[in-house]
Amino acid sequence: HSLTSGNYNTGIGAGALFSNTTGTSNTANGAAALASNTTGGGNTADGSGALAHNTTGNGNTANGTGALGFNTIGSQNTANGDGALFKNTNGGFNTANGDAALYNNTTGARNTANGDAALQSNTTGGNNTAEGFQAIFHNTTGSSNIAVGSTAGTNLTTGSNNIDIGNKGVAAEANTIRIGTVGTQTKAFIAGIHGATASGGAAVFVNASGELGTLTSSARFKDEIKPMDKASEAVLALKPVTFRYKREFDPDAIPQFGLVAEQVQKVNPDLVVRDGQGKPYTVRYEAVNAMLLNEFLKEYHKAQVEERKVAELEASVMRQQRQIETLAAGLQKVNQELAQARSATRLVVSEQ
């Protein structure tokens, strides 16, 4: 042993704390446990080869064969399980609970892996949290990912800022939240939404893949912008109906008002949303509203034209009326003059 001035150390097992010089408050139980430690202090190694290569790392806890086996200067790591944080060298503040959890981690820091093989492939990624068997298994350099559930986030590789709950995720994707698995979870109940008002927001839509989003309207997101023209005339062929949902979907059988997707598809397939099997699922009511607006505006503009025509006709009639009145007045004057002329003629004749 090389112990010189290190105090409060406990080494049990062949080669345990073999190279320690000034490191203090270390506990090593198992063959070669903390064998290379020189000045590192406050470490606990329980298991054959646990923290075997640690030299100056402090405050590490390793329980299990080979746990933190290659750690050299990394500090404040906790590894519980055979091979947990096995290849870690100088990554710090990691927690690995489970066999081979964070096995390949080298310099990644502030990772938490709970479950056998959780974050097993991680090398330099940091701030990841994996809860469950093989959670975030294939991640190597991605950071700030959260996965909860057996094999949750297992498909993640290099992407960061993902949250996968009960979902395996997608390789290389980033900044994505996935909850549940399409085809497995068929209903969702989230408290705190119904009855709550969020003013100034936008309606939320969901596609057949379960992706949530809002209907964007900015020109920044659009191509081939052109007037709707006659395309909106399709709504005039739609047949609104009243109905009730089947008891299995709505036990209260509340009266409903709307359209039937299969009927709408016959009029305009672009107004129908389809499910994962390509079958009609619902109607794009927001598009129907836009088409109705276009038809309303067309009729409104027609009415304006008619109103202008009526106004022009009324003005023309008024002009004609004034002309008639002028002519009538002139005719009356002429008649009066003729009457006066006749009266004068009779007077002359009588005097003769």
Image (cartoon, rainbow, N blue to C red):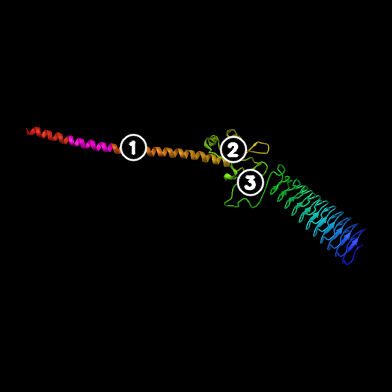
| Disc number lying in front (2 or 3) | 3
How far, Cα to Cα, is label 3 from label 1? 58 Å
The quadrant where residue 329 appears = top left
Percent position of residue 171, x then y: 73, 45
Q: Amino acid at mark 3?
A: Gly
Q: Position of residue 159 (x, y in %)?
A: 72, 48
Hey, what amino acid is under mark 1? Val
Residue 256 visible at all: no
For label 3, count other residues whose C-alpha is less than 10 Å away and answer few (under 14), some (14-19) or many (20+).
Answer: few
- The residue under label 3 is 213
Bounds of the magenta span?
A: 324-338
Indicate the amino acid at tag 2: Leu
Examine the rendering and report whether any part of residue 337 can be seen. yes
Q: Secondary structure at mark 3?
A: strand
Distance from disc 2 to disc 3, alpha carbons, whole Å, reads: 18 Å
Q: Earlier in the sequence, mark 3 or mark 1?
A: 3
Q: Is residue 335 one of those drawn in magenta?
A: yes
Quarter of the figure that contains the N terminus: bottom right
Q: Which mark is residue 317?
A: 1
